[in-house]
Image: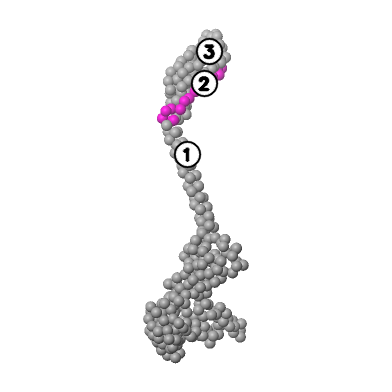
């Protein structure tokens, strides 16, 4: 009997050593067994079984195996091959493994950075609070409100020009809305609120009952923190060009002048801008009489500066 077969060697490996064993049942006294594995060959004749260790010539792909028997009825054969990874396969495995590790590391780093960025956004939202521009708007709105209240000696209590119709729907009270509209229009337009300047004074200029709470208020915006802690503030706002005379008229009379030009300063309806009680006036020299102090942007600016507003909490 003759059998020939190929024993496959795994891809990337090479055969380096082997071990073969065989046992037989024979029916002739002159039986024999020939075994060839790769470049190795053995013949076994009478007297026992095959048990042989050997080395390969680093075969790759497959190892040829051939068996020939004579006078043998049954034979059992076991072949063990030890393989070793080839240098080329080892380098390929190293490159593939390095690439896999690198990709996994990059993926983990990307996930880490994404999560870190998300946490930083959350932390920034929690710590930074409002946009500084929004804080400036809050400061200016509140100071403007109190400045108008101080100038007009009122607390906005009478601004309620909305009524209810007979059917229960909200509707403006037209006569009141007209009156309030003139008032609102004048103070929104007569001053350059966008050029308002202000400075905050410490907490101790406010109510003593609030000293402890106000002095420890914090904000990530330093100026807004100063606003929150302040006990008072000084506000200076210029009149808008073209409204100087109307503003001066209101400051002296408390009346909003609309339509025709307001009376001249030499009119009996107006007193000198610079009260003459002991203070030198360019027109009357401090004589304390009615006088005509020329209205200029400079003089009005000085007048408004002298009337700068101090707001106290």
Q: Residues within 10 Å of mark 1 (few under 14, many from 20)?
A: few
Is tag 2's residue or tag 3's residue first in the polypeptide sequence? 3
Q: Residue 282 sits in which quadrant?
A: bottom left
Q: Depth check: give the residue in front, 89 or 205.
A: 205
Residue mark closest to the camera, 1 vs 3: 1
Q: Which residue is mark 3?
A: 71
Q: Residue 210 sits in which quadrant?
A: bottom right
| Residue range (magenta) | 71-90
> Are the two marked residues, 1 and 2, in contact with CB atoms closer than 8 angstroms?
no
Q: Secondary structure at mark 1?
A: helix
Q: Which residue is mark 1?
A: 101
For marks 1 and 3, give the CA distance: 59 Å
Residue mark closest to the camera, 1 vs 2: 1
The answer to whether residue 36 is visible is no
* Residue 129 position in % (x across, y down): 52, 60
> Are the two marked residues, 2 and 3, in contact with CB atoms closer than 8 angstroms?
no
Is tag 1's residue or tag 2's residue first in the polypeptide sequence? 2
Q: Depth check: give the residue in front, 146 or 49.
A: 146
């Amino acid at each position: 009997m003759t059998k020939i077969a190929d024993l496959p060697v795994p891809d990337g490996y090479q055969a380096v050593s082997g071990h073969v064993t065989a046992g037989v049942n024979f029916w002739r006294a002159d039986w024999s067994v020939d075994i060839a594995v790769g470049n190795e060959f053995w013949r076994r004749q009478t007297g026992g079984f095959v048990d042989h260790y050997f080395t390969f010539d680093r075969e790759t792909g497959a190892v040829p195996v051939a068996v020939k028997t004579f006078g043998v009825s049954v034979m059992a054969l076991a072949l063990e091959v030890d393989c070793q990874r080839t240098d080329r396969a080892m380098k390929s495995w190293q490159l593939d493994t390095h690439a896999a590790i690198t990709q996994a590391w990059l993926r983990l780093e990307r996930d880490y950075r994404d999560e870190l960025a998300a946490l930083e956004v959350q932390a920034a939202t929690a710590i930074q609070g409002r946009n500084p521009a929004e804080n400036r708007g809050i400061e200016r709105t509140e100071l403007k409100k109190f400045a108008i209240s101080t100038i007009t000696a009122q607390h906005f209590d009478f601004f309620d020009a909305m009524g209810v119709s007979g059917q229960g729907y909200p509707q403006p009270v037209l006569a009141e809305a007209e009156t309030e509209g003139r008032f609102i229009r004048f103070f929104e337009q007569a001053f350059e609120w966008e050029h308002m300047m202000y400075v905050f004074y410490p907490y101790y200029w406010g109510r003593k009952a609030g000293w402890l709470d106000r002095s420890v208020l914090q904000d990530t915006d330093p100026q807004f923190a100063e606003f929150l802690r302040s006990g008072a503030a000084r506000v200076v706002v210029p009149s808008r060009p073209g409204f100087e005379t109307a503003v001066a008229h209101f400051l002296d009379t408390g009346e909003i002048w609309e339509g025709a030009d307001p009376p001249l300063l030499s009119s009996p309806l107006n007193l000198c801008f610079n009260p003459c009680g002991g203070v030198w006036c360019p027109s009357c020299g401090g004589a304390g009489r009615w006088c005509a102090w020329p209205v200029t942007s400079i003089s009005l600016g000085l007048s408004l500066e002298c009337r700068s507003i101090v707001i106290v909490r």
